[in-house]
Image (cartoon, helix red, strand yellow):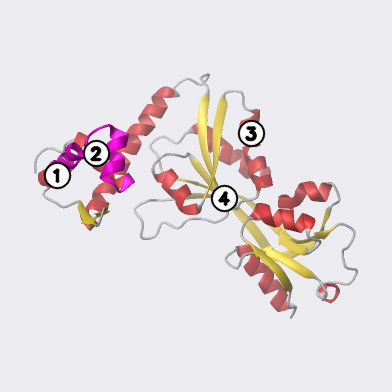
Amino acid sequence: MGRLNYHHLYYFWRVSKNRSLTEAADELHVSQSALSAQIKQLESSLNVSLFLRQGRKLVLTDVGRRVLAYAQDIFNTGEELENFLQKDSAYQMQHITLGVQSNLSRNFIESFIEPLLESKNINFSLSSRGMTDLLNGLVNHEIDLALTNRAILSEGQDTIWQNQLVARQPVAIIGPYGNKPTAAFPEGYQDKKWVVPGKNADIRSAFESFCAVHQYQPDIKAEVDDMAMLRLLARDSGYLSVLPPVVVKDEIESKVLEDYGSIPQAFESFYAITVPRKFAAQNVLDLIKTAINKYA
């Protein structure tokens, strides 16, 4: 096997990310035939097959997936070097790219990014994504940090996820202000209707366990996966809900909603997810430390 051609490897990396010769060729400003020829040369020099064609799609072989993992490390490290050289001055404006889970509490997100809003030498971009897009963004170094409500396991995967628990918020029964039942749960709640998180949410599981212990069958009007939508329904419907109070802190402060009491041993956890880098960005580390100290 001859010396590895990193130019060919880079083309393989870009095609693998796009799963399409056409899209990769357009991004790289080369012809499809030239791009295909370079990848064939790489396969020939390595004496392996990297892709299988299924219809119009390119699918990585088992060897191709392993080669891709190495290529990602190589070129992500190169991107880190470029970022390091661009941000070598402590007085230069620095940029952080954040991704947040699409159904996460907006109030918590705002609290998390507050130090960035107050910083004079850091600007940032914030995008809301599904979990798969968040993880892909981390792997491809499109985002520096992902904020989620669950940890990501690394078992059986090439990527090692770094999960940092930054906060655990208690979960409470939330209802219209001034209408809290005088009788304790469950006696005072027999005629109540509920809007609750979807069945896959940890909060929902905690609520169902709480109800089972008290032999209470909730009358569920709606199940909602999106926390922002659940906040609106809790505010406007007149029904009870199950939320971390931080989600509706403005409504509680303005006496539209009221915290009827916490559910024992029920919490929503918030995690900062990153991937290992040669040199972790200090501003990202500082942001995580600040959040941990704030919610300690």
Q: Secondary structure at mark 4?
A: loop
Give the structural element (helix, strand or loop) at label 3.
helix
Which amino acid type corresponds to the residue marked 2 in the rendered image? Tyr
Where does label 2 land, which residue?
11
Q: Quadrant of residue 172?
A: bottom right
Residue 213 in view here: yes
Which of the 4 image quadrants contains residue 262?
bottom right
Q: Is residue 263 left or right of residue 135?
A: right
Q: Earlier in the sequence, mark 3 or mark 2?
A: 2
Mark 1 vs 4, N-terminal side: 1
Overall secondary structure of the magenta stretch? Answer: helix
Q: How many marks?
A: 4
Residue behind mark 1? 40
Which mark, by number, is residue 115? 3
Q: Which residue is mark 4?
A: 102
Q: Which residues are drawn in magenta?
A: 18-43
Q: Residue at x 50, y 42 (%)?
A: 145
Q: Nearer the viewer, residue 128 or 75?
A: 128
Query: Local crowd at mark 1 within 10 Å, few (<14), some, or many (≥20)?
Result: some
For residue 253, side relative to residue 45 (left or right):
right
Q: Is residue 75 magenta?
A: no
Q: Quadrant of the N terminus?
A: top left
- The amino acid pointed to by label 1 is Lys
Residue furthest to the left in view is 1
Calculate the distance from the C-alpha at mark 1 to the C-alpha at mark 2. 11 Å
N-terminal label among 3 and 4: 4
Whole-number angstrom distance, CA of label 3 to CA of label 2 = 39 Å
Left-right relation of 138 to 77: right
- Residue 296 visible from this viewpoint: no
Look at discs 3 and 4 and give the one toward the viewer: 4
Q: Secondary structure at mark 2?
A: helix
